[in-house]
Image (cartoon, rainbow, N blue to C red):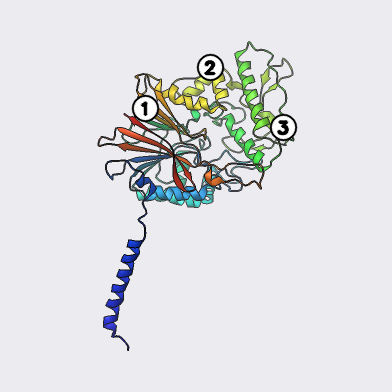
Amino acid sequence: MMMNKKFLLPLLMTVALFLVSCDKDDDPIVTNPFDDQSESSDAARSKIVVISDLHMGNDLVYSENVKHLDRLEQFLKEVRASETIKELVLGGDILDEWYVPTRIDTYGSGTQADFVRKSVEANKNVFDVLNGIIRDGHIKVTYLPGNHDMGFLPEQINIAMPGVNQARDAGERYPVGTYSPDGFPQIAIEHGHRYDFFCAITPGANESEAPGSIMPPGYFFARIAANSFVNPTTQEAATKVPLVTLHDPGNAEQRSKYVYYNLWKKVMEEVIYVNDSFSDPIITTNIGNFTKSYAINDILPRNNASDGNIEMDLYNGLFTQENWDARQRYNNVSIVNHVDSSIVGSLKTAFINDQADVQYFRNSESKVRLVIFGHTHIPMMKSHTNLQGEKCLYVNSGSWEDRKTRDQNASIDQDAINMHFVVIDPLGADKKTLQVSLYQYKYGTHSLEEVSVLDL
């Protein structure tokens, strides 16, 4: 029997509503992991999330972050959907114009702006979510520069993330940046590279070669490192670093150059093996006011033929305490360090981590109680005591880069490697108690590694 149409439509709608209600009752209620972890006494947005060292490159053939991009997109979607996050801080090395194999012309026939656009396109899904967070306007997004993205002007960052808040120290177009989240002057977030001899901004170092350049020696280290993974060789087959001798140990500058030489020797023979001749001009620049192609020998120290003193073609004038003091002041370092300690500290990450204590907690002019760095790629949390006897906390936010291997067929569980982030959760009615948590985004879940409470 054919049912009258005027009764059929209401019946179908009733059945549909019943089925939908049954589905809702049966399905588990999915809570955003950021909101589920909240210890706040109310549902207002208050959390601050910090990530750093995403190292999103221009070409996924050699970029440092390829295997983790899908997880990064997933993580940022959780940030975007959260109802308790107030701020997202991008703590430097977000883009990467350093990690480019030696023979590749970084910009090709284009400009730095073209490089940024290509980087955004290569990492489109991630930037789509990031820019969605910015456009939504619910979560403040702040970017501060690291060393791998120190050369990008504010307007170039705005190409990648239109409207992002940029935390840059006053007075320079290429500065480092320190950020204190809204309402929390006791928190200092910075990348951490300003204390690193290899990676701190380096004005005036190579004026005859690249007038106005700020690129530090670490830039060339990154280029050689990228080459060593794209064109791998073995430690046994790698080109060996020529012997350099310290003939004048009483000369402080010569001693510092010898320290620098030994650091290069260590990394070239134990970390970044290359099978190129050191005299071949394989490092194509065309970036940061450099225009030539350089040989590895142009960067490495050597004994000169006349008196045996240690010298080099690039960065030869950096190795006096006076020069390092001036360079630290340019990088807005409050408490200047010894040049030799800073050279060695470029490889020993404890030196960088300890700068949280030196520059902030043991500095009588500082009121900062919580410091967050990136840069070293080693996530950690460490308690300190300031000059007033108050508990302070240092946290390193780790990295989202892949684990690199020279064996292209090696099986690596990248889903259990890196991908760390920090959550600051202000507690109580006055928000003066901070629960600080270090997580790993392991297999797409929030895996808590360490937590501490700080009363401001």
What residue is shown at x 71% (from left), y 16% (from top)? 308
**Residue 322 tag number:** 2
Residue situated furthest top in the rendering: 250
The residue to which callout 3 is attached is 278
Residue nearest the observer in this picture, 92 or 405: 405
Q: Position of residue 57 (x, y in %)?
A: 55, 44
Residue 20, above or below 448: below
Residue nearest the observer in this picture, 204 or 257: 257
Q: Is residue 114 at all visible to an observer of this figure?
A: no
What residue is shown at x 44% (from left), y 46% (from top)? 161
For label 1, the SS is loop
Q: Which amino acid type is shown beneath numbered disc 3?
A: Phe
**Residue 369 tag number:** 1
For label 3, the SS is loop
Q: Nearer the viewer, mark 2 or mark 3?
A: 3
What residue is shown at x 29% (from left), y 83% (from top)? 5
Horizontal side of residue 313 vs 135, given as left or right: right
The Cα–Cα distance between marks 3 and 1, rounded to whole angstroms, is 47 Å
Q: Earlier in the sequence, mark 2 or mark 3?
A: 3
Q: Position of residue 369 (x, y in %)?
A: 37, 27
Q: Nearer the viewer, mark 3 or mark 1?
A: 1
Horizontal side of residue 294 vs 97, given as left or right: right
For label 2, the SS is helix
Residue 312, above or below 420: above
The Cα–Cα distance between marks 2 and 1, rounded to whole angstroms, is 31 Å
What residue is shown at x 50% (from left), y 27% (from top)? 352
Q: Position of residue 158 (x, y in %)?
A: 44, 44
The Cα–Cα distance between marks 2 and 3, rounded to whole angstroms, is 31 Å
Q: Earlier in the sequence, mark 2 or mark 1?
A: 2
Q: Is residue 433 at all visible to an observer of this figure?
A: yes
Residue 208, above or below 74: above
How packed mark 3 is, by other alpha carbons closer than 10 Å (few <14, some 14-19, many 20 or more), is: some
